[in-house]
Image (cartoon, coloured by chain):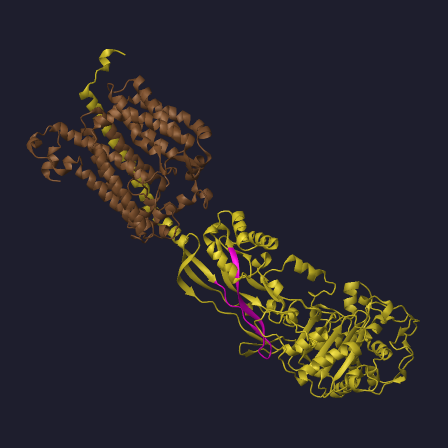
């Protein structure tokens, strides 16, 4: 990116008005964000290559998913935030209906109904909800003066509550928490009062016991108990965490070297392609690798927050901010759970873990961000 | 709400948003620092712990069991070998569900209830991560079937190992004994390091006695294995030291002849070299197939052996204690000459009974009416005159009998290199006082005079005592082992009767020769076709007491209470090379039942025979060759 490109995006700068628009501008692409995402995807593929024991087929398959996801991202970037705002309420109702459908006619896998079959093609409505929920909350709040009044806050919370409850019922606790969080970020960015936030935390504290006792499924409780003391069940529930901690710890500062991780290559590390892939990276590239990865995520989040805060419209600001903060939550929850800080809730490491659907959802989110960014430029022109 | 509040204040909203983003950045930074802290803790502070754990995951120190030493007979015939065998094993820690796994295996390779029961027993006393055997002797076909289904049963492996095999089976059952899987009790006794790779240990017999020698020293290897326990590569290897190969003094051909001589009978034969103490043959009949015991005998087979009234598991040669009966007479005759109580010329009258002075009880001779008015020592031995030895014993007294008997190895274990040997009994005043708490009565001495009463000896002790006579006073600990590798083993000399004059030895040897060669000898039936000089003595041991005056009627007595038949012999008489003792339970007639067996063994050893009809090593099959008459298809 040239210096002038950068300057053109600064608010109140009028020199760019007469310049012809570059290809990236015409395609609504934010070059720094795209470059960072591509680097991250590259890192992900190289770690996946190692995690899959040098299986080129696995890497190519993931490469195809990535290509599709990046194309989808660019397509989504073409939409104007105001268009998204107009569609938000309808999308929200649609997603609610789909989630209801999943709970009644969904396809099961591993004891949970998360999939909906549409003529041989299966998809997860909860993935859609990850974007549609913050969109709906942002739509609702942006049509009212901010910070939101108590009434608007409660209505927003209800908007968050419906899809969350439906996803909990699938049951998919991890996703439901992340989706609820994305909605709550919108409320937070909209400026709900600190007093309200504080009382919510108090309420959650009070709710914790009945939640534990009546809402959580046995396997979810088991995961939490195992997390607190994995040594209790070394070969059963605690195995994953013990092995991932061993993989991370044995990597040391410098790591064992690419393709040299014994924990992953000798099959001690479970789920090494998907949710536990950070352990492969930590084992082979050491703390150095982990810090560089965090730096990469940090840059993406910084860029994302900067784009969101430049948005002229309230809707874009709230949605963009929520998308990028949720992105960070994914990183934190994944890295936290693999290192034994948090319960194992089944959250992939963004852009690094193997997987198709979640990747598309993620890049659709960045597409929305880029659309906001492009909108900002148009305003200045 | 009032209208004024409904208006949007863009500038204010932006300020609130920027404030919230700032707070968010702070939170993001804090949480990132938490992650950095966590990963630093794992990768820097606790690096050593996890590095060790990671290595322990993949690197295992595996013991390599040493190859157990082989056992050969004196002619190099293999008596105990190691054959490859495939064992199906299960590592419980690597199995998802034990019951499911067993069910799947059962689909592929049918398991018997006994297999599963034994497996669960072994499972309860395994070491962590130890591969516990489920089924032994798995066929190649079953291995292939299992390989196809391997993914369904993680933690299940086929283990190739060498397993002990006894090609001669029951022929050497009691002598060799057998190895078996290490039991819970043995685990506490053995060296845990040296036996870390070993599954088998000598349980009984020679295998147990020479366990240390046969076992060898364990080796080890460092291997890298994956999470499924599959070994990927060997990082380091130290070879084990194999156990010593041993050669026995035993001649398998003589052993076979001896065993066949006892066919369908219960009894024991021991043959040894009187000059070296080397055991030439030692059998106990009936025998059993020791191969059954190697991998744990099934309860059905074991009960069959245990409940067999012929007691095949009982090693009669070492454990059977029988009254030596008349076979003791040559030794007592020698004692009489040695102590000067009698001379070869001393004659007594035998009216058919003997009684102590001032006692009305009559000690009867086996021959009604006695052996005549004038019986000397030689005649007494040849015809087995009881009255002569009643009187001799009375004159010698129990103290001299005990001290002289002890010099033939009676009343104490011989010290053979084998297990479970019993000591027999050479009674004395001291013994009676200790064990029965009473005085020694003169009448008890009279019974000792004909090897009855309290006296007991094992067939091995009789063979040793016969060797002492044959070698003119050399008492040796009998030895099965001839050499380890190239190194010869010499049987220790325990005593030498140098104080006994050679004239006395001559007299006794001559009388024993006459037993076989004399016209009135109790073993005269053996002399037909004899090409060497054989000296012997028969014995018929009473199993139940016969009331005074009653006649022994074999038909009226239960078969198990009939007299035992005994025979001792050595040959050639002038230069003895073999001494034999035969005991046939309920055989009734020493000279005509036990004697021929002794003759066969001596013929086999001294005259030799082709040794081709022995089962060659390495084949599994019937153990004792049974000669079947030529059949024609007419």
Rendered hue of chain B is yellow
**Depth check: A98 or B39 in front?**
A98
Q: How many marks?
A: 0
Does the magenta-highlighted stretch encompass residue B72?
Answer: yes
Work out whether residue B163 can be spotted: yes
Of all chains in the rendering, the one displayed in brown is: A
Where is residue B620 drawn, in percent x and y?
59, 69
Q: Which residues are the magenta region?
A: B64-89
Does the magenta-highlighted stretch encompass residue B267?
Answer: no
Kindly indicate the quadrant of the structure image that contains residue A297.
top left
Q: Is residue A45 left or right of residue B403?
A: left
From the viewer's perspective, is residue B602 above or below residue B167?
below
Quadrant placement of the N terminus of chain B? top left
Where is residue B452 drawn, in percent x and y?
81, 72
From the viewer's perspective, is residue A129 above or below residue B598?
above
Tell me what residue is drawn at x 76 percent, y 82 percent: B536
């Amino acid at each position: 990116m040239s210096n002038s490109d950068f300057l053109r995006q600064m608010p109140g700068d009028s020199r760019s008005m007469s310049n012809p628009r570059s290809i990236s501008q015409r395609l609504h692409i934010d070059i720094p964000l795209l470059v960072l995402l591509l680097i991250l995807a590259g890192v992900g593929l190289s770690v996946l290559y190692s995690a899959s024991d040098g299986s080129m087929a696995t890497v190519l398959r993931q490469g195809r998913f990535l290509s599709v996801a990046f194309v989808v991202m660019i397509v989504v970037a073409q939409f104007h935030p105001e268009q998204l705002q107009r569609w938000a309420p309808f999308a929200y109702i649609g997603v609610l209906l789909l989630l209801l459908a999943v709970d009644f006619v969904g396809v099961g896998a591993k004891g949970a109904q998360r999939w909906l079959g549409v003529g041989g093609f299966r998809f997860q409505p909860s993935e859609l909800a990850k974007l549609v929920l913050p969109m709906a909350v942002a739509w609702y709040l942006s049509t009212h003066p901010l910070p939101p009044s108590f009434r608007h806050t409660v209505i927003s919370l209800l908007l968050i509550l419906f899809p969350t409850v439906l996803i909990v019922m699938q049951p998919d606790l991890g996703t439901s928490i992340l989706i609820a969080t994305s909605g709550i970020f919108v409320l937070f960015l909209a400026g709900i009062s600190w007093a309200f936030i504080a009382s919510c935390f108090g309420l959650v504290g009070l709710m914790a016991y009945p939640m534990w006792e009546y809402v959580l499924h046995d396997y979810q409780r088991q995961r939490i108990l195992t997390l607190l003391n994995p040594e209790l069940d070394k070969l059963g529930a605690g195995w994953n965490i013990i092995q991932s901690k061993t993989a991370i710890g044995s990597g040391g500062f410098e790591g064992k070297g690419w393709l040299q991780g014994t924990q992953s290559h000798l099959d001690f590390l479970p789920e090494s392609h998907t949710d536990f892939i950070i352990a492969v990276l930590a084992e082979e590239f050491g703390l150095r690798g982990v810090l560089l990865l965090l730096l990469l995520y940090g840059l993406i989040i910084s860029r994302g927050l900067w784009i969101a805060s430049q948005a002229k419209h309230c809707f874009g600001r709230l949605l963009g901010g929520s998308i990028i903060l949720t992105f960070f939550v994914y990183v934190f929850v994944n890295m936290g759970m693999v290192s034994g800080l948090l319960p194992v809730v089944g959250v992939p490491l963004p852009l690094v873990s193997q997987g198709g659907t979640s990747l598309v959802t993620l890049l659709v989110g960045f597409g929305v961000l880029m659309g906001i960014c492009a909108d900002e430029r148009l305003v200045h022109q | 709400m009032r209208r004024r509040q409904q208006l949007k204040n863009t500038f204010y909203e932006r300020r609130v948003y920027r404030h919230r983003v700032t707070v968010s950045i702070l939170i993001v930074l804090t949480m990132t620092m938490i992650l950095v802290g966590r990963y630093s803790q794992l990768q820097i502070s606790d690096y050593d712990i996890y590095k060790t754990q990671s290595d322990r995951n993949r690197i295992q120190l595996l013991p390599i069991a040493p190859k157990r030493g082989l056992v050969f007979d004196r002619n190099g015939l293999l008596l105990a070998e190691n054959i490859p065998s495939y064992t199906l094993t299960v590592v419980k820690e690597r199995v998802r569900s034990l019951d499911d796994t067993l069910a799947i295996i059962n689909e592929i390779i049918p398991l018997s209830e006994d297999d599963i029961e034994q497996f669960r027993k072994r499972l309860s006393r395994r070491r962590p991560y130890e591969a516990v055997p489920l089924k032994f002797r798995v066929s190649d076909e079953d291995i292939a079937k299992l390989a196809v289904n391997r993914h369904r049963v993680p933690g299940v492996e086929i283990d190739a190992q060498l397993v002990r095999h006894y090609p001669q089976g029951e022929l050497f059952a009691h002598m060799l004994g057998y190895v078996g899987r290490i039991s819970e009790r043995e685990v506490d006794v053995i060296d845990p390091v040296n036996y870390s790779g070993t599954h088998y240990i000598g349980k009984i017999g020679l295998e147990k006695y020479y366990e240390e020698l046969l076992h060898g020293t364990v080796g080890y290897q460092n291997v890298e294995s994956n999470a499924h326990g599959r070994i990927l590569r060997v990082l380091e290897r130290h070879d084990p030291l194999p156990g010593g190969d041993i050669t026995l003094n035993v001649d398998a051909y003589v052993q076979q002849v001896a065993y066949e001589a006892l066919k369908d009978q219960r009894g024991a034969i021991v043959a040894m070299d009187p000059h070296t103490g080397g055991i030439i043959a030692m059998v106990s009949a009936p025998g059993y197939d020791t191969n059954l015991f190697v991998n744990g005998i099934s309860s059905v087979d074991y009960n069959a052996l245990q409940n067999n009234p012929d007691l095949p598991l009982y090693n009669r040669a070492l454990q059977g204690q029988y009254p030596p009966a008349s076979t003791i007479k040559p030794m007592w005759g020698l004692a009489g000459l040695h102590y000067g109580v009698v001379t070869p010329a001393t004659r007594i009258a035998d009216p058919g009974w003997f009684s102590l002075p001032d006692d009305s009880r009559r000690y009867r001779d086996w021959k009604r009416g006695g052996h005549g008015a004038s019986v000397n020592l030689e005649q007494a031995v040849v015809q087995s005159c009881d009255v002569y030895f009643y009187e001799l014993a009375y004159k010698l007294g129990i103290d001299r009998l005990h001290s002289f008997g002890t010099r033939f190895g009676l009343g104490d274990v011989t010290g053979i290199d084998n297990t479970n040997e019993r000591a027999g009994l050479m009674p004395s005043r001291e013994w009676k006082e200790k064990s029965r708490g009473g005085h020694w009565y003169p009448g008890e001495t009279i019974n000792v005079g004909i090897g009855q009463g309290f006296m007991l000896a094992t067939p091995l002790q009789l063979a040793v005592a016969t060797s002492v006579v044959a070698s003119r006073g050399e008492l040796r600990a009998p030895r099965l082992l001839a050499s380890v590798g190239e190194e010869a083993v010499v049987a220790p000399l325990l005593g030498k009767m140098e104080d006994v004059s050679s004239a006395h030895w001559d007299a006794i040897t001559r009388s024993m020769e006459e037993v076989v060669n004399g016209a009135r000898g109790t073993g005269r039936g053996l002399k037909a076709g004899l090409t060497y000089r054989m000296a012997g003595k028969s014995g018929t041991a009473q199993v139940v007491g016969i009331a005074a005056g009653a006649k022994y009627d074999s038909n009226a007595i239960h078969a198990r209470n009939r007299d035992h038949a005994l025979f001792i012999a050595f040959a050639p008489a002038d230069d003895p090379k073999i001494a034999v003792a035969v005991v046939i339970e309920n055989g009734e007639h020493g000279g005509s039942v036990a004697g021929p067996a002794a003759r066969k063994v001596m013929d086999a050893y001294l005259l030799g025979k082709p040794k081709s009809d022995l089962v060659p090593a390495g084949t599994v099959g019937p153990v004792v060759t049974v000669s079947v008459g030529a059949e024609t298809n007419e």
